[in-house]
Image (spheres, rainbow, N blue to C red):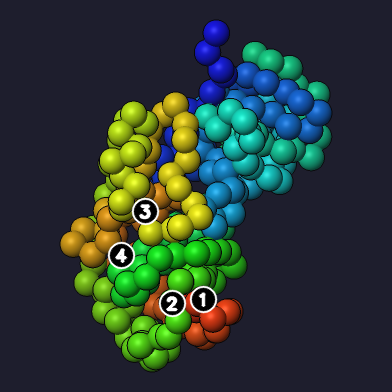
Amino acid sequence: MSEIATTSLFDQEPYERTFRASIIEVKEDLIALDRTLFYPAGGGQPGDSGELRTKQGSMRVVETFRDAVNRSLIWHRVDNSSETVGDAVDGAIDWEPRYSNMRMHTCLHLLCSLISAPVTGCGMGGEKGRLDFDLPEMDLTKDEITRRLNELITSQIEVTTSLIAPQRRAELLGLVRNRYALPPETSDAIKVIHVNGVDVQPCGGTHVANTAEIPRVVCEKIEKKGRQNRRIVLRFDN
């Protein structure tokens, strides 16, 4: 018998904010849906928060993540629950933090295009983002990174998504920049992000459709985190 699974609506509809779904599993304060717009934490991007509403009332979603074993199943941790399997649900994500993460995640792909080294860590949230690189020395200064990133942003580069069959996962491994975060293995598809002419890599996160949506950014600092590790921290210059 096949495992239960959640359809990842955010892969093809990252700008949608509301959706309808059905509950397929309940475990204490965790609810799994047959489809969701809530992005599950992963790849350095925080999970979405928001609200689920059923005939019993509304619930705040405070955490969203993939099941540790069945990676095609997405759990929503809620602040209260009396729902059962089969109940209909109306969901709404908190848009502002999601959109901020979309803009920063795409900006981090632009940063990848400037640094020719494997990525060893990633994080974002609160209008900041950072990448760690397996790099003994940095050739670029903070000012040079700031200038080059903003040149790319204002070039209004289209960002597109392609969904590749999971059976072709091995073919995509050569495009992976993050040494410790391979594309998620799910029954849906492997998502590949194309910043046209600039960067192509498998990535499960949500992204903007054009770099023009990214605010001006500043390279806040370059940190030495070890003999072979350099951390570059960005922030939006709002």
- Alpha carbon of mark 4 to alpha carbon of mark 3: how far? 21 Å
> Mark 2 belongs to which amino acid?
Leu
Q: Which residue is mark 1?
A: 229
Mark with earlier residue (4, 3): 3
Q: Quadrant of residue 84?
A: top right
Could you tell me which residue is drawn at 23 percent across and 64 percent down? 198
- Alpha carbon of mark 1 to alpha carbon of mark 4: how far? 28 Å
Q: Is label 4 or label 3 in front?
A: 3
Q: Is label 2 or label 4 in front?
A: 2
> Mark 3 belongs to which amino acid?
Val
**Circles 2 and 1 in contact, beta carbons < 8 Å:** yes
- Alpha carbon of mark 2 to alpha carbon of mark 3: how far? 17 Å
Mark with earlier residue (1, 4): 4
Q: Which residue is mark 3?
A: 176
* Front residue of this view, candidates 114 and 38: 114
Residue at the limit of the structure toward the top, as seen here: 1
Mark with earlier residue (2, 3): 2
Image height of 17 relative to 136, above or below: above
Q: Which mark is residue 135?
A: 2
Helix, strand, or loop for circle 4? helix
Mark with earlier residue (2, 1): 2
> Mark 4 belongs to which amino acid?
Thr
92 relative position to 213: left or right: right
Q: Residues within 10 Å of mark 3 (few under 14, many from 20)?
A: some
Q: Residues within 10 Å of mark 1 (few under 14, many from 20)?
A: some
Q: Quadrant of residue 135?
A: bottom left
